[in-house]
Image: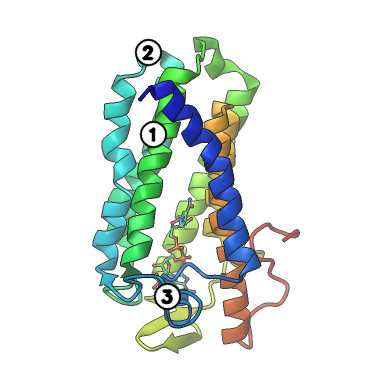
Amino acid sequence: MDDNLVFRVAVYAGFAIAFVIFWWLSHKDQKVPYGRHHVAAAAATMASVPFIHVMLPTRLAWALMESPPVLLTPLLFSFGRYSSLAAPRVLMSLFFAHYAHRSLFYPLRMRPSSKRNLPLPVFVSAVIFNVYNTYIQVRSVSHYTQYPSSWLLSFQFILGAVLFISGMAINITADYALISLRKSDTPRVSESSRTYKIPHGGLFELISCPNYFGEVLEWLGWAVAAGSLSSVVFFLLTVSNLVPRAVSHHQWYVQNFREYPRSRKMLIPYLF
Ligand code: NDP
């Protein structure tokens, strides 16, 4: 089939998929069943999802499900008609850097509450999402959008890159702060073998999920820097996944810790 047609259908489908995910996760109060929401979600709302109780080794599953962008980006990029130009290369390095960290370093650092806490359907959907998303991002940047070299000096690219790098720094700092909580001795709540504590410091004083705030900021920056429909689709897909999950995390903290600071917002400092 014609790649141009496949690409366009894939990009426009992304808008619909983002809408459906957001509607499903928020309107039906569903929770993606991994981490702290696994027990409740798998037992109740998602009980009918096939293989929901098949659990994979957490770290290996994260490394594998986040690896398609690392493996496919260089390959797909090399087929792009603009792959030798500077602007596509710089743009793609931002995308690649995110996934190199997420698939290689993050799984090595994480301390999951249990050694096997990633359900098979979550793993499969993450792999499908990452293959799909890598395809539309890489083809857009390397083949279907023409960026002159002067793009790298434009206000739009610089603003997007600053947002992207700031978001990535916030995301990584917050993820590692959460990971290190499993070493310290602040108040905790236990859910079978799982232990969670109230995070403190930095953006955690303002919002419950700075790691998701950073991730949303990152892909907002990507949408601005790349300025394409594909990059907007990725931003919307991130929002549709992470906003409902941030709401669930926040409610979970409030329900499980009487001393949880009520002034904290869910995702966006002072606003939401
Ligand atoms: P969570 O915040 O749910 O968990 C991050 C890690 O910290 C997990 O290992 C978790 O353990 C642990 N943790 C979280 N809160 C606490 C606490 N209060 N006390 C102790 N340990 C805690 O993030 P996710 O696992 O959902 O996501 C991980 C990364 O992936 C994030 O950076 C996120 O932005 C990104 N992501 C991006 C998506 C996208 O659409 N772009 C979608 C989903 C995630 P445990 O797993 O045992 O709960």
Q: Quadrant of the C terminus?
A: bottom right
Return the x and y of residue 188 as percentages of the image width and height: 48, 85
Which residue appears at 54% of the width and 48% of the height?
17
Q: Considering only order in the chain, which callout, 1 or 2, is on the residue closer to the N terminus?
A: 2
The answer to whether residue 91 of the structure is visible from this angle is: no
Q: Which mark lies nearer to you, 1 or 3?
A: 3
**Distance from Cα at disc 2 to Cα at disc 3:** 45 Å
Residue 30, compared with residue 1, is above or below; it is below
User: Of the residues shown, which amino acid type is indicated by label 3?
Assistant: Ser
Which residue appears at 44% of the width and 83% of the height?
43
Residue 250, compared with residue 168, is above or below; it is below
Residue 27, compared with residue 71, is above or below; it is below
Q: Considering only order in the chain, which callout, 3 or 1, is on the residue closer to the N terminus?
A: 3
Instruction: Quickly name the residue at label 1.
Output: 135
Instruction: Quickly name the residue at label 3.
Output: 48
Please say if the residues under marks 2 and 3 sit with CB atoms less than 8 Å apart. no
Q: Quadrant of the N terminus?
A: top left
